[in-house]
Image (cartoon, rainbow, N blue to C red):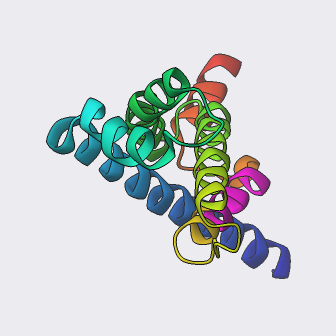
Amino acid sequence: MIGDDSAAGRMWAVLFSRLILGLIFFMAGAFKVFQMGALNHAANLFVEPYADTFLPVWSLWLTGTTIPYVELIAGGVLLIGWRTRDALVALGAVLVIVTFGHLLAAPLFSPSGHIFPRWALLAVCFVLRDDDRFSLDRFLRRWAAT
């Protein structure tokens, strides 16, 4: 009985973590792509603040225009639980890049505001990925096995 409760707890924990993380990134990506615009995002949040650093300007444009699409796509596929591992790796990379940028601008930056909660959800999704019974990945694996 305890084993069943533990498995059910992991199942719900990973489902809610995946859905919350997917919503956070999907909605951020949708805003940056469709309302703000990816080029505007890059100009205002990457190029302008970091143009005087050691980072090449072309890398700021590339990263600043790519991240909104990564957030949109990876957040969306995370919501349905498809290619979950790939989406988590992509979103983990986004969190590393954003953390690096904040620390470059302010070396004593605290990641507790928005980076750490997203990382915690991402870690739960990675660690409990095999317990995600409501993902498209699990459905496709079961379907392929029949």
**Residue 125 covered by magenta stretch:** yes
The quadrant of the image that shows the C terminus is: top right
Residue closest to the eye, 144 or 26 = 26
Is 3 drawn above or below residue 101 in the view shown? below
Please name the residue shown 39% across and 48% down the image. Answer: 45
In magenta, the rendered stretch is: 119-128
The overriding secondary structure of the stretch rendered in magenta is helix
Can see residue 98? yes
The quadrant of the image that shows the N terminus is: bottom right
Corner quadrant of residue 18: bottom right
| Residue 5 x %, y % | 73, 78
Residue closest to the eye, 104 or 120 = 104
| Residue 78 x %, y % | 49, 43
**Residue 23 covered by magenta stretch:** no
134 vs 96, left or right, is: left
Please name the residue shown 64% across and 17% down the image. Answer: 144
| Residue 106 x %, y % | 62, 66
